[in-house]
Image (cartoon, rainbow, N blue to C red):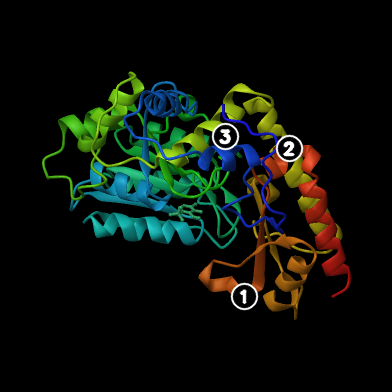
């Protein structure tokens, strides 16, 4: 791993929006290494490691492609569904609409089941939709970043497997991977898509997706009759590239983001090889989340998720008290050293704000980030 103990990033306000998040000196320094060839032996080793080491699944095929989280939607829409086929989107906030929009861009026919704001879609509603027609795939947002609602991935996958086993289960994990518990293989999830800038603790720019062997076999090699409607997002193009790097060889389709891959490697090494373990990591996220949410409750702030059972642990969404607006709060939080995010869900955008607590902000207790967040909340809301 690249280390430069004397490298320190410039002092700055704590970035606690729900992604991008704070990035460690070590990861930033890995990004700042001299330019390197994408076919150089040391890069082949590092890129291969990143593909092999993405521990979300032991069976699935990772795709690491230059792009943001949105590229994961394009990959799903381009490769796993054909024009005219049905998709079911579970909506727990803003990102359900965008995923639907992306699927429709590629010609899929999309039905949406919409939860109440702050709620989750019931298993009964999913079951009844799956019985009503044949869906090629179902998508859901594990944590919807606009609402902080955490969907029950295990239960959703179980329902799909039981009622419509051929329907592929697609999990948008942009705001959940590395913060929320997720067992892709054990829960029977076909695709997990995410990005570098949230729980994985890397600057934005990498689309990271894992597809089950079933999804790849069924849609890339067997039952596809229509051409893939994207050049850059086509798994037919990327699969040989990923396989080559995985086996220690270079291959070219489009230039990978070399420096960012080094940064990702540094973060992944810390996450997968060093303390804390994944289990410990999830525990730390739960504890940090409780601290932030308990502080908010003491200040009389109401959470956006309707039930604590499905509130995310990597972020918190809080309604402003009556008569208080974002402009009364966010600049004051900033003056207290933290950058938080405003609302995003169109229907209630002005009424709430969001705080992210993922990655080193949670895992590296010595930084004291959680205490900075809770102190800023107390200072600002006590004086409103
Ligand atoms: C849940 C979720 N899905 C998808 C996206 C899109 O990712 P990106 O902005 O990296 O394209 C985001 C972005 O915040 C997100 O939070």
CA separation in Å, label 2 and label 1: 32 Å
Residue that extends furthest to the top in the rendered view of this protein:
247
Q: Nearer the viewer, residue 257 or 187?
A: 257
CA separation in Å, label 1 and label 3: 35 Å
Q: Nearer the viewer, residue 43 or 318?
A: 43
Circle 2 residue:
364
Circle 1 residue:
350
**Tag 2 or tag 3, which sits nearer the N-term?**
3
The image quadrant where one finds the C terminus is bottom right
CA separation in Å, label 3 and label 2: 13 Å
Circle 3 residue:
267
Q: Residues within 10 Å of mark 2 (few under 14, many from 20)?
A: some
* Numbered disc 2: secondary structure: loop
The quarter of the displayed image where residue 99 is located: bottom left
Q: Residue 220, position in %: x, y?
A: 21, 34
Residue at position x 12%, y 45% from top? Answer: 226
The quarter of the displayed image where residue 212 is located: top left
Q: Residues within 10 Å of mark 1 (few under 14, many from 20)?
A: some
The image quadrant where one finds the N terminus is top right
* Numbered disc 3: secondary structure: helix
Tags 1 and 3 touching, CB below 8 Å: no
**Tag 3 or tag 1, which sits nearer the N-term?**
3
Tags 3 and 2 touching, CB below 8 Å: no
Decide if residue 318 is on the left or right side of residue 197.
right
């Amino acid at each position: 791993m690249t280390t430069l103990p004397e490298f320190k990033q410039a002092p700055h306000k704590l970035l606690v929006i729900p992604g991008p998040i704070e990035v460690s000196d070590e990861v930033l320094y890995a990004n700042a290494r001299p330019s390197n060839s994408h076919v150089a032996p040391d890069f082949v080793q590092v890129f291969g490691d990143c593909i092999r080491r993405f521990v979300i699944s032991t069976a699935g095929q990772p795709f690491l492609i230059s792009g943001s989280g949105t590229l994961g939607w394009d990959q799903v829409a381009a490769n796993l569904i054909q024009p005219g086929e049905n998709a079911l989107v579970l909506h727990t906030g803003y990102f359900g609409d965008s995923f639907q929009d992306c699927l429709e861009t590629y010609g899929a026919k999309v039905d949406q089941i919409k939860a109440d704001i702050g709620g989750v879609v019931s298993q009964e509603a999913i079951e009844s939709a799956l019985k009503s027609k044949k869906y090629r795939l179902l998508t859901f947002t594990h944590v919807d970043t606009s609402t902080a609602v955490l969907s029950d991935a295990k239960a959703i996958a179980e329902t799909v497997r039981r009622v419509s086993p051929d329907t592929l289960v697609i999990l948008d994990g942009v705001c959940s991977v590395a913060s929320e518990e997720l067992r892709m293989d054990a829960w029977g999830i076909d695709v997990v898509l995410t990005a570098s800038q949230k729980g994985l603790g890397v600057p934005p720019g990498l689309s990271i997706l894992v597809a089950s062997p079933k999804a790849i076999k069924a849609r890339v090699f067997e039952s596809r009759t229509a051409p893939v409607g994207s050049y850059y997002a086509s798994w037919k193009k990327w699969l040989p590239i990923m396989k080559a790097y995985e086996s220690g060889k270079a291959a070219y389709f489009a230039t990978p983001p070399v420096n960012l891959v080094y940064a990702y490697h540094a973060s992944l090494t810390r996450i997968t090889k060093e303390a804390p373990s994944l289990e410990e990591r999830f525990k730390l996220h739960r504890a940090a989340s409780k601290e932030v949410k308990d502080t908010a409750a003491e200040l009389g702030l109401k959470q956006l998720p309707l039930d604590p059972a499905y509130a995310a642990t990597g972020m918190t969404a809080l309604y402003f008290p009556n008569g208080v607006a974002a402009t009364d709060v966010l600049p004051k939080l900033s003056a207290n050293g933290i950058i938080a995010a405003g609302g995003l869900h169109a229907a209630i955008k002005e009424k709430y704000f969001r705080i992210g607590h993922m990655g080193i902000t949670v895992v590296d207790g010595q930084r004291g980030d959680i205490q900075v967040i809770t102190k800023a909340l107390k200072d600002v809301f006590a004086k409103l």
